[in-house]
Amino acid sequence: MKQVTLIFTCLLFLTASTLKIQAAEPARLPHAKAAKVGMDPDRLSEIDFVVERGLERDSMPGAVVLVGYRGKVVFLKAYGDRQVKPAQQAMTTDTVFDLASLTKPIATATSIMKLVEEGNLKLSDPVAKYIPEFAANGKQDVTIYQLLTHQGGLIPDNSIKDYLDGPETAMERIYDLKLYYQPGTRFAYTDVGFILLGDIVKRITGESVHEFSQKNIFQPLGMQETGYLPADELKQRAATTQERDGHWMQGEVHDPRSYRLGGVAGHAGLFSTAEDLAVYAQMMLNQGQYEETRVLKPETIDIMTRGYPVVDDIRGLGWDSLSRYSSNRGDLFSRRAFGHGGFTGTAIWMDPAQDLFVIFLSNRVHPDGKGSVNSLAGRIGTIAAAAITKQPGQTAGVSVASRASLEVQTGIDVLKQEQFQSLKGMRIGLITNHTGLTRAGESTVQVLHDAPGVQLKTLFSPEHGFAGKLDVSKIGDSTDTKTGLKIFSLYGKTRTPTPESLQDLDALVFDIQDIGARFYTYISTMGNAMRAAKEQGIKFIVLDRPNPINGVDFAGPVLDEGAQSFVGYHRIPVRHGMTAGELARMFNEELQIGVALQVVSMKNWKREMYYDETGLTWVNPSPNMRNLNEAVLYPGIGLLETTNLSVGRGTDTPFEWIGAPWLQGMQLAEALNRSGLPGVRFVPVQFTPESSKYSGELCGGVNFIVTDRERFQPVQTGLEIAIQLRRLFPEQWETRNFNRLLGNRRVFDAVLQGQSLMQIRSDYQQDLAEFGVRRARYLLY
């Protein structure tokens, strides 16, 4: 045992002497007076009162509070003492703190997401892929995603005795642990999972999480006071924690397991200062970039920080969002806020919706480990949010009004501006319908027919026909009366262009307005045509158009492998948040189509835009998609169409209500309103369809009133409706075809079993997060 202890001591010395962070002049976020950036300084001064009261109540001996707003530090103050034993030392704003579990998101999860972004690992990968020894005792299926969200079936902390024989033996004992619960069925906060994530960083890169985070996160950001194993100068201004082995810990990791692992571990060990953390927080709010340094892509930040249902809690990847651990979260933070706390008395929260972050650093464990600060940190966050007098959108950023003033130009507009250079000298076929229009309302058919140097030889039409007016099961070929060109139907005897129809063509051009849902078939027509073009050896060109329900949000279960069909062309979620051009890029690579693909991108389109913000004229993309409100509802309400419900076809407002002769609208509306779905209310109604399902029959039903489009979640709403239908009308509601558009057997079974919406959403979040990573590779805007 003495020999093991000696080896461990030597290892600690070597690690500390070779890898310590060095003090230098750090990068700083600029300071500004609160009133100048839209905050009430009198409100902010209330922080003094709550912190002073915390000091009086011995919640902690001292603290540093920093508030950042709109890219500026507007409040920074030190309170109390950084040390009271063995001698008193006053707290200063540059005090170095042991961040404890803030290590998890800031060092470890950020490093993991960097590796995900670079394609070195997948969120759905089993941990055992990188640590084969971990597969022991039934842990072979635990995934990276489950570790990041504390659902990996692991014990919160294994015995400290497992760490007494050195880091290597400690890790072997972690690999050999038995499952604490079935992975994916519970949220159980665990240090062990993040120790493993730190180990995965080392397995992939050959560098410890300390080395990797320094090289890829902290040094590029100029965070010279942040890292593991602080150097002597930083130790001297570190807040003291508790006694260990007869000495006070100052600049030495407090967590006993991290200490036994050499001070470098995925769950604890990181040190920093308030102003260094402000740089990191601003990088996160800036979607991965600080000044000229980019750490992560915006899409990666989105995947990392969006709230994922985890049984009855909401967590990010490495971050807290709204869970049983969120007592340090401000009450006035938006639903987009994310943050974390640390055992030593630390907390950081960032709110993208308000461009606000709050950092609270204390040494609440000094001197006796009895302090308590979580609720205090939460009150400080509430004060900071309450002090905002001008929201970011009022004077900064891109407002809805300014977005609407941008002249969005679709692919055909851009092609025309470029004088058809991409098509010069080509014989082309055009896949389009009535939605193929320029911004000025000219038909794409006519524009390309008249384009100099371009030979438009033939036309192809999708479901609903060339004019978009048919709602029948098969459509025959026809002729365009204006150009005299033959129109080959891709919704008739065949849904794929035939070799004969592609003869003598150099390229196929696609210009159709999609709606943003997986089961809207225009994207399937595109995929089929891409394959046909590849087989014919010709080029495929997509003239891109907006996703009308925005290109930010993606939601719902991902299509099961093997469930592909014309209403589910590829393994994407119900709401995909992509344009046709971006989907073409995804299909081409992931389905290994390999066609010579070109996307003519739009100009001035922003991902957050809904169609009414583009300035483009709405044209019904299909007979029953008559306005933007119906398009917004469609990904959720459309899911129910294959059951014995009317979704309003045959009425003036399809997809804005559902009903059936057997449905009690008042009962269903009451249950749905009670469920608390965001951004929508439900009104009992009666209606009689003039055609389609239940034609001529009086239907009881529910009308959907979208009250807040930004908060409304259509897929979530559709699933909750299914849950309530199953609960209220188990005999009347026929579910046998419900999975046809849902496309996910686990979710289908969960609805039939009566699981809650939170449980169902939790079940598909790993696949959804993985889709987010895949999706990021193909985005154009």
Image (cartoon, rainbow, N blue to C red):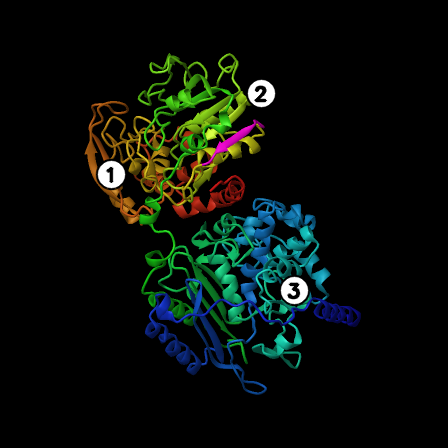
Which is nearer the eye, 733 or 507?
A: 507
Q: Position of residue 640 (x, y in %)?
A: 35, 33
Identified by mark 1, the residue type is: Asn
Which residue is disc 2 drawn over? 537
Provide the residue span drawn in magenta.
Answer: 594-601
Identified by mark 3, the residue type is: Val
Q: Position of residue 376 (x, y in %)?
A: 41, 72
Identified by mark 2, the residue type is: Gly
Q: Nearer the viewer, mark 1 or mark 2?
A: 2
The quadrant where residue 749 appears: top left
**Distance in Å between CA atoms under marks 3 and 1:** 56 Å
Which residue is disc 3 drawn over? 264
Local secondary structure at mark 3: loop
Q: Residues within 10 Å of mark 2 (few under 14, many from 20)?
A: some
Q: Position of residue 480 (x, y in %)?
A: 36, 15
Instruction: Please tell me the numbered disc located at residue 259.
Output: none
Q: Give the left or right position of residue 596, taking residue 259 as reference.
A: left
Q: Position of residue 579 (x, y in %)?
A: 44, 36
- Residue at 31 percent across and 22 percent down: it is 469
Q: Is residue 733 above or below residue 175?
A: above
**Of callouts 3 and 2, the N-terminal one:** 3
**Distance in Å between CA atoms under marks 3 and 2:** 55 Å
Instruction: Please tell me the numbered disc located at residue 703.
Output: 1
**Of callouts 3 and 1, the N-terminal one:** 3
Q: Residues within 10 Å of mark 3 (few under 14, many from 20)?
A: many
